[in-house]
Image (cartoon, rainbow, N blue to C red):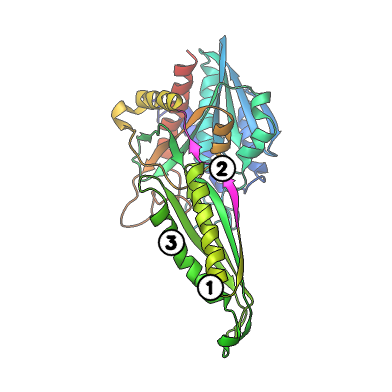
Amino acid sequence: MAIIEKKSDLNDLMVEWRHHLHKHPELSFKEDITSDYIASVLESYDIEMHRGLAVTGIVATIHGTKKGKAIGLRADMDALPIQEQNDFSYKSIHQGKMHACGHDGHSTMLLGAAIYLKQNNNFAGTVHCIFQPAEEGGGGGQVMVEEGIFEKFPCEAVYGMHNFPGIAEGQFAVHDTACMAANETLKITVKGKGGHAAMPDQCVDPVVIGAQIITALQSVVARNVAPLKSAVISITMVDAGFVSNVIPNEMNLTGSLRYFTKEVGDEVKGKIKDIVEGVSQSMGASATFESIPNYPATINTPKHAELCANAAGMVVGKENVLRNELPTMGSEDFAFLLNALEGAYIWIGNGLVPEDGPVGGCMLHNTQYDFNDEILSIGSSYWVQLVQNILK
């Protein structure tokens, strides 16, 4: 049963807040308007807060009526560099910026929970509501950890939540362990010998070599990673040449590597290096390979995943808590918080994706994505229920 009802005044306010945040999206570490707006709402309810971690981050603290342990609840605030293609009253007013991942909804659900808990603080302990900047590639979670968030605000565990199109409204998905993959950026440079396109025999063509490397890399996961384990290699950018009749001196390849365990990641990177260097050398070129870590894998602590599943079940019914969903190869910087502290990260259904178009339910990072206002009360109620269960 939802604690915060859809027909409540608080839910109406959450819709208003969510639309405001959606209309004013800001990119990583530049969430100044966003941070000020969230802080103004918190201040209007006399909620204690600390500002400035990771530039624009906010930690709002609510104390229960009795002493007890402390937990952290985290929501992300930043938007994406995407031009919005929606046409509703609260569409983005900032060119080339859009809340295409639902962080406006995440912040709103946590804000609603913070206000409810402030007004209904019959629990034992402390809740730190973490409004985190720069999830979309900026690593704001890592910066918060490095700046000592859990030293300044000690917590027993930390919890996160993300909306997920494709999971029905009114459902949650909870993973016992692996939830989202690690993410590294691959950079490969093939150095050959340029020359006239009509005289390839006098050149060492890095484009041909690069093409063979791209093809060869597709066999790394299929033939080196155990079938019940997971990894993904995607070459996503190719840069070579400047005119049609010249073979260039070098070719640059950029891509993405995803995996769940360090052992698999190390094995795959070793094979990539062997292929890059071996193919290049065999064709008379040289090459360099670098893999740059971005986000580690998001791995839940089983006992905390169980606490999340129990709380979600109390809000939407146990039958609506999915426990066997596969993890995704996408990545999430909440992983940095889970590396520093125990906890769990769950998905809340944003609604099924219609087959006949993106209206009202397209996937994340789509130009027509919009967070589903119908789940604001569900997600906010989940946060409240989790606090009430843990801080009895």
- Circle 1 residues within 10 Å: few <14, some 14–19, many ≥20: many
Q: CA distance from mark 2 to mark 3?
A: 41 Å
Residue 338 pos. (x, y %): 54, 32
Q: Secondary structure at mark 2?
A: helix
Name the residue beneath numbered marker 3. Answer: 218
Give the quadrant of the N terminus: top left
Residue 291 is inside the magenta segment: yes
Between discs 2 and 3, the one toward the N terminus: 2
Between discs 3 and 1, the one toward the N terminus: 1
Residue 18 pos. (x, y %): 52, 40
Residue placed most toward the observer, 352 or 245: 245
Residue 71 pos. (x, y %): 55, 22
Please say whether residue 80 is visible from this viewpoint. yes
Q: Is residue 62 above or below residue 143?
A: above
Q: Is residue 216 above or below residue 245?
A: above
Residue type at mark 2: give it. Answer: Leu
Residue type at mark 1: give it. Answer: Ile
- Circle 2 residues within 10 Å: few <14, some 14–19, many ≥20: many
Residue 84 is inside the magenta segment: no
Residue at (31, 32) in percent of width and height: 320
Residue placed most toward the observer, 197 or 305: 197
Name the residue beneath numbered marker 2. Answer: 21
Q: Magenta span covers which residues?
A: 290-301
Residue placed most toward the observer, 115 or 274: 274
Q: CA distance from mark 3 to mark 1?
A: 15 Å
Residue 340 falls in image quadrant: top right
Residue type at mark 3: give it. Answer: Gln
Residue 160 relative to residue 174: left or right: right
- The label shown at residue 209 is 1
The reply to whether callout 3 and callout 1 are in contact (CB within 8 Å) is: no
